[in-house]
Image (cartoon, coloured by chain):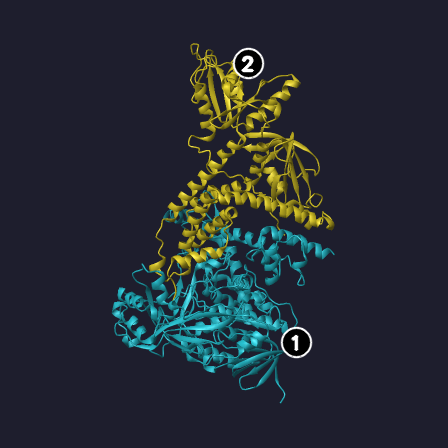
Chain colours: A yellow, B cyan
Amino acid sequence: MKNKTIVSISTPLGKGAVAIVRMSGEESLKIAFKIFSASNLEISNITPRLLYLGKLELEQNVYEECLMVYFKAPFSYTGEDIVEFQIHGGTLLAQKVVEVCLKNGASMAEAGEYSKRAFLNGKITLDKAEAIIGEINAEAESELKSSLQITNGRLAEAILKQQEKLKTLLAEIEVGLDYPEETEETKLKTNIYEILRELYNNIENIVKQSESAKYFKSGINVALVGKTNVGKSSVMNALLGQDRAIVTDIQGTTRDNITESFSHNGIKINLIDTAGIRETEDIVENVGIEKSKTILKTADLILFILDGSEKLSKEDREIEKLLTNKKCLYVINKTDKIRAIEKFENEIEISALENKNIEKLKNTICNMVIGEEIDPNALVLTNERQIEVLKNAQTDLQTILSENFLSLDILSTSLKSLWQLLGKITGNTENEDIIDLIFSKFCLGK
Amino acid sequence: MEMEKFDSIVIGAGHAGCEAALALSRTGNKTLLLTISLDAIAFLACNPSIGGTAKGQLVGEIDALGGEMGINADKTAIQIRMLNRGKGPAVQSLRAQADKNAYHQEMKKTLEKQPNLYVRQGEVDSIELDGENKIVTTHLGVKYVAKSVVLATGVYLKSEIIIGKSRESVGPNGFKNSSVLSDSLKKLGLKLVRFKTGTPVRLHARSVDYDQMQIQLGDEDVRPFSYMSDKQPENKTVCYLTYTTPLTHEIIKNNLDKAPAISGEIKGVGPRYCPSIETKIVRFADKERHQLFLEPEALGTQEMYLQGFSTSMPADLQLEMVRSCVGLNHAEIMRDAYAIEYDCIDPTELSPTLELKTIKGLFFAGQINGTSGYEEAAAQGIIAGINANLYNKCKEQLVLKRSDGYIGVLIDDIVTKGTNEPYRMMTSRAEYRLLLRQDNADMRLTEIGKQVGLVSEERYAKLKQKKKIMQEIELKLQRLAKTDQKLINFCQINGENVPKENVKFRELLKRNNIDIFKLDKEFDLFDESEKTYLDFVNTEIKYEGYLKQQQEDVDRMLANEKNEIPKDFDYSKTKGLRDEAVEKLNKIRPLNLGQASRISGVSPADIAVLSILIKKKQER
């Protein structure tokens, strides 16, 4: 029996220095090796139940150091192959690791699924059955609640609308396949690909909006880097100004690096200092560097603070190297003096001393992370699974749009899976719905 | 007098009854086939055609299992077409105009020639249980006894024909109906519902003005329905396409008070896919015209079937309506259109074997189960026949899965979800339709037919031969095509990149602009016996990726399907399932987790809980 390989974060969200992301299923190891590498480690020579220190690829060329352990079936919690990643604490990083696993072929674990599998594989004794049933029902209920929340909201409407569009298109295609003789009635009147492209754009929008929406909940994480004496702390103070907020638990960062937060247009902006990015022999400071590198990986935006009155130094260039492929803004400070530094494509001139262009900097931060046209009340997808569904839908649509050899039966089959996929969010997956639409829309029959 | 004893009795000799009776007698059961009229055997009561979208697939599957419908249709086809050409192989379906008289006669002959099968005219009034045996009593008081009974009564139960104000207690086409059996079924604990269907007018061919219509020709290059028929189908007749006019619509709109389907006179639930012309006009008021097809009923008659013109309007109005259509201004009606109401059962009372859950050895097939269509009926008939035989022999019964064929989809749908209108098969109901094609029904089902003893040696040998040839074709495609001038030219002409090194023909075949026929023409790869199957191989290779993907879906589904629920499982005594789920599960009593997951109102969390509960029960 082929079970899907499932993944989820298995430590409590938000707290703790370490988070664990767990996969279970036949493909676990295969997926792990697509994203994790350690020296001399290969799929053929891995030893179960041994911790491996290595690198996990979060994005192209963006790595996170972490520990990996493999439990070989049946000697694991679920009785299946299990791979666990132990990563730095914080929800955002853990979510990112889950996302990478999903991208490489895992599926989100269903309510109580680990325990269910453990039970079905005889790993949990009979007397625990009631407890597991309780777990499944409780999780299903809380998921139902969160899906009910969106069902009432504008998001549900937006997704429903897309699903309805798809349904109409499906009905139009299907009726032509099932009633080829009723040519009067069933001629395809719409441009399928035009509709699909529109659908793609709409879904992309929803995903984008939802991703930005999470910033309204947890704030934007902005890391400040720069060598000493460029005025990092004065920039920070200028930003904090009168709007200084109380620092609370911030997801995705290790606490001791958080400096402070402030609020701008209702959005919380967390400033994270990264003192100590410098190659050094000092062991204590080395720990600091590793920490700082992690911050750079998970920050939503990096402010690269430079002294505008000086030419770019060797040290600056070392730091710049760490910023490749990251969302980054060059902040040219000390513009009260004569500018000596070269021009950068993505720069902003400020003077922390004279409080010049600080508002502009705040706006730029928000715009770069969230985009300009974000309505704070816009669509919010809270549930990770729902975002996964939409992202999968995007991928599927991309595949459909890129195919040039598609007969109607294939196209329609792909569209139906897509429709069912969206149904995981809206709850509408009854095939009969499409058939109902066919008969209400088209006049058919002998 | 002592009752005559049979292994099985089949009640009704329509399309379901014929397949059931043949399946039973061919597997060695002494079988009695009772019919109200010998002249109504395999009667094409409505359209004179077999096949069509999804239905063509059903015919192929019935044939692959060792059934008769495909063979009989091939014998009696007078025009044949392949629908949906160019829309992809999964949705291509054969449709044949059948000679209505010949279809009945040929089937009757086949039944009469069949050893072990006793065909008798007689109306059944009651079925009673005598221990494990069933006693069947006819209207004339004759009693028969059998181990198992298949009910295939079609639309005959308490049927009434409605035309305008006239409501008559008769069967289709004026045959006698079955007026008492319904009550006997109620006594056995069955709940009955009332469905409705209808049929259009039949016109005299000489009264039609064909010049104003569009001629519809058959296809010359199609294969027959049956894997056993070697003869290329021949087109012996033509059909015509015409339309209603604004006048037709006006006449109908002005007389809606006389339409039983609109006025509420007809209470039975009719199929949405088969509305009467007056229903079409009311529901789609903005449509300017409706398509009508004129199809010959048989070669030996002048009667023409007017597809699209089903109605229950009064007879005089019918004539006025018909004469307002294009080319029908002088039409003579030979038979009036009518609506028919009838009793049927709730199919969720059946197990997926088509056996009644509450009475072992009692099987139901065809329109009595709330379906519609000859092919749907025959498909259930053959399964009911197969399972009645297995029941007689105390063997495990056959359940076709949704991934085995349209038959599996059809039965699973009706027994798991029920139906609130006469159920028609559609390709959109089959989620694995890329795998359930007309061209591979034998590959999917003949082995199963062989296991249940219905497939003849001859048919099985044909399948083995086909598989052997398939392998040879595959071997040839594995050969390398050399990058010589010939290949370069071939690729260039077809607008494809020239491969840099030698490449397998199979790989070339995957290119968009290349198909197996082009390959064969250019490189002369295949011999005569192989040419028959090129189309099939072409599909399998070109669609390989999609087929593989769908197969993976099937494998996932089957994992749940293998998870059987104990027959005596008591849902009401469990903890953790929601009340709604308990109620639904108790009613349907699914065989396995897969079927359970398709019941509406049962959630994925319920299925997860159920899997735990089953495991728990097994371990106790």
Q: Position of residue B21 (x, y in %)?
A: 54, 76
Residue B497 shows up from this direction: no
Give the label, 1 or 2, closer to the camera. Answer: 1
Q: Position of residue B209 (x, y in %)?
A: 26, 72
Q: Which residue is mark 2?
A: A228
Could you tell me which residue is drawn at 45 percent across and 51 percent down?
Answer: B509
Q: CA distance from mark 1 to mark 2?
A: 95 Å
Q: Position of residue A13 (x, y in %)?
A: 61, 35
Q: Position of residue B611 (x, y in %)?
A: 65, 53
Taking the view exactly as shown, the residue that stands out farthest to the top is A337
Residue at mark 1: chain: B
Vertical order, B45 against A111 (above or below): below
- Packing grade of label 2 (10 A; few <14, some 14-19, many >=20) is some
Secondary structure beneath disc 1?
Answer: loop
Vertical order, A120 against B38 (above or below): above
Taking the view exactly as shown, the residue that stands out farthest to the bottom is B1
Vertical order, B584 against A163 (above or below): below
Q: Which one is in front, B81 or B336? A: B336
The three-letter amino acid code for the residue at tag 1 is Glu
- Packing grade of label 1 (10 A; few <14, some 14-19, many >=20) is few
Q: Which residue is mark 1?
A: B132
Q: Which one is in front, B465 or A443? A: A443
